[in-house]
Image: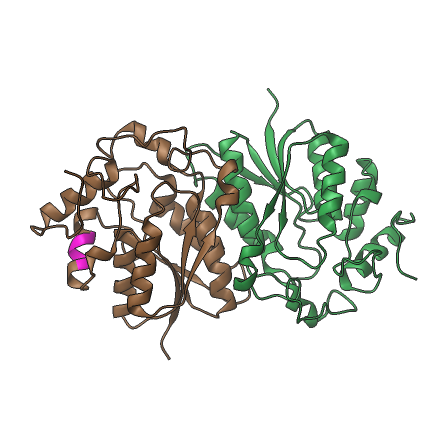
Chain colours: A brown, B green
Amino acid sequence: MSKKAVIILSGGLDSTVSLYTVKNEGIEIVGVLSFDYGQKHKKELEYAKKTCELLQLNHRIIDLQCLNPLLESSLTRQNLDIPEGNYKEESMKQTVVPNRNMIMISIAAGWAISLKADYVVIGVHQGDHFIYPDCRSIFINQLNKAIEICDWHMVRLLTPVINLDKTTIVKLGIEEKVPFENTWTCYKGKELACGKCGSCQERLEAFKNNNIKDPISYEN
Amino acid sequence: MSKKAVIILSGGLDSTVSLYTVKNEGIEIVGVLSFDYGQKHKKELEYAKKTCELLQLNHRIIDLQCLNPLLESSLTRQNLDIPEGNYKEESMKQTVVPNRNMIMISIAAGWAISLKADYVVIGVHQGDHFIYPDCRSIFINQLNKAIEICDWHMVRLLTPVINLDKTTIVKLGIEEKVPFENTWTCYKGKELACGKCGSCQERLEAFKNNNIKDPISYEN
């Protein structure tokens, strides 16, 4: 009998590549969760929807905007600007949403337990820089130990891209035949990707390093 | 400078006793979180409110009912009855809400990080029986290790009553001068406490063991 998984899908590159990777390995995707936490790049949710429609998956978008007043971040606050420039800069730390990954993972684990699934899949990657403390494998490993004993039914975390950098994630996506046009990365969430924020710059560099053109459109 | 804490307050005995204990130790309570997750005993939230008004605390009730369809439990489903009788019985396992504590703790930790608090306080107690897997200290200890590294600002879990049984929690409440009339325990959540569900029976026994009268009213 094939293993079952619930996956957290933001609609971005990392989670979409994770989804295709796990699915192609023969794991049955019994549920897909996306979260609206008031992110400025809410547009990514449309892309999550596209992927789930294409693959005919059981998709739920959970509205967590009620948490927004509790969690300080430039990713969600209208009065704070998204910083431009390279991801490695200190200023990107403003975009951390406190404990976002644990909040999303704990909800996904609860659903996975109800569905008697074996795994919760999340597309976190620690990259070669540490801006997001809750993307580090040291954190994910520790959280996994708690998840494994949170219920009488055992669920484990699967993080297919955690040790990959963005270039390698795009490479994996090419191998797994991911339709990259169904992914959204820009933090600004306007009609077209800005091409300037840390998130866009990292994506563009990853495609360039793989010698392929990013199929999405950019401003300019 | 005094330490700061965010506390999860259900309005029940355990969390209310935890709140008074921590407060009386001189820890500043900077935020109190209660959750509406579609529990049938929603009445407990009114009691959480009473306590926060009395102590003039910053109280937020978070509506998580959107998660209800994902999490199978007789505590939240209208078509499933709350079992009666002793807590130790197998049937009480129906009342487990999958991963409820991790979901609540992760949100409280996010808020604690935003407020630069030192602790998240939760009134879990493992008792002398294991119905709720996410009340066991083995789980809480593991989760604490993840919480400590989920952000650049360090937050820790505090669980003042985890190793106490219900009788000792009531004893502690007497010492800490907890107004027990401001706590709600019954899982049925009608006008008066039923006195019959596992939760009521355990409370009644704890007061009896302390030779004091429970100040709340019961049916019959």
Relative to B218, residue B85 above or below: below
Compare residues A59 and A150 and report the one nearer the observer. A59
x 67%, y 41%: residue? B160
Residue A17: x, y in percent? 25, 58
The answer to if B20 sits in the magenta stretch is no
Write down the quadrant of residue A205 in the picture.
Answer: top left
Relative to B13, residue B191 above or below: below
Residue furthest to the top in view is B1
Relative to A5, residue B28 above or below: above
Residue furthest to the front in view is A191
Left or right, B113 with reference to B177: left
x 55%, y 66%: residue? A152
Query: Which span is picked out in magenta?
Result: A169-173
Q: How would you classify the magenta stretch by its main secondary structure?
A: helix
Left or right, A208 with reference to B124: left
Compare residues B74 and B101 and report the one nearer the observer. B74
Numbered disc total: 0
